[in-house]
Image (cartoon, rainbow, N blue to C red):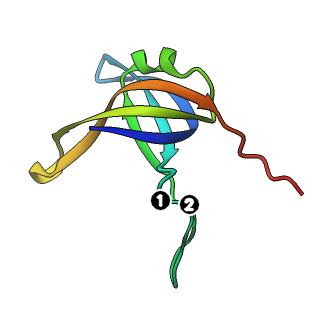
Amino acid sequence: MRQDVVIVAARRYGFSDNGKRVEGVTVTYFDPELGPQASEDRRGVELLSVSAGLELWSQLEAVPGLYEAKFTQKPGKGGRPSLALAGLTFGEAVSLSAEG
C-alpha cells in the first residue's frame, strides 16, 4: 500500500535486548488528506508513529517533508494486522511554522 504522508519527526534508536543489538527508526507522521479534526473529544491533526528498519534513515531527505510511504502488513498481537513502513520516496520539504 502506498500513501502520501507528512513526516514531522524521525528518531534513530539502538539498544541491546538480551545480548542482541536492536536498531531502527521511529517515524512520526500524519495523513495530509485527513486534515484537522474537530469533534467533542478531539481537536487538530492526529499524529501516527511507526517503527522501521535503520535503512530508512537514509531515505529521509528533509523533515518535516512530504513523502510517498510504502506500507506492508505483518501479523500483530492476536493475529491482527499491523502496518510496517517499508520505504519512503521524498516529495518536497514542508514548513510547519506558525506565521503571525
Q: Quadrant of the N terminus?
A: top left
**Residue depicted at x 54% and y 60%:** 35
Up/down of 15 relative to 34, above or below: above
Q: Say if residue 92 shows up in the picture.
A: yes
Residue 85 lies, in percent from the top left, at 34, 32
Q: Is residue 57 left or right of residue 71?
A: right
Which amino acid is tagged 2?
A: Val
Which amino acid is tagged 1?
A: Leu
Q: Quadrant of the C terminus?
A: bottom right
Secondary structure beneath label 2: loop
What number is the disc on residue 34?
1
> Tag 2: Cα neighbours inside 10 Å, few (<14), some, or many (≥20)?
some
Please tell me which residue lies in front, 25 or 71. 71
Residue 38 lies, in percent from the top left, at 55, 76
Question: Which residue bears the numbered disc 2?
Answer: 45
> Tag 1: Cα neighbours inside 10 Å, few (<14), some, or many (≥20)?
few
Q: Is residue 3 left or right of residue 81?
A: right
Can you tell which quarter of the image residue 83 is in?
A: top left
Residue reaching furthest bottom? Answer: 40
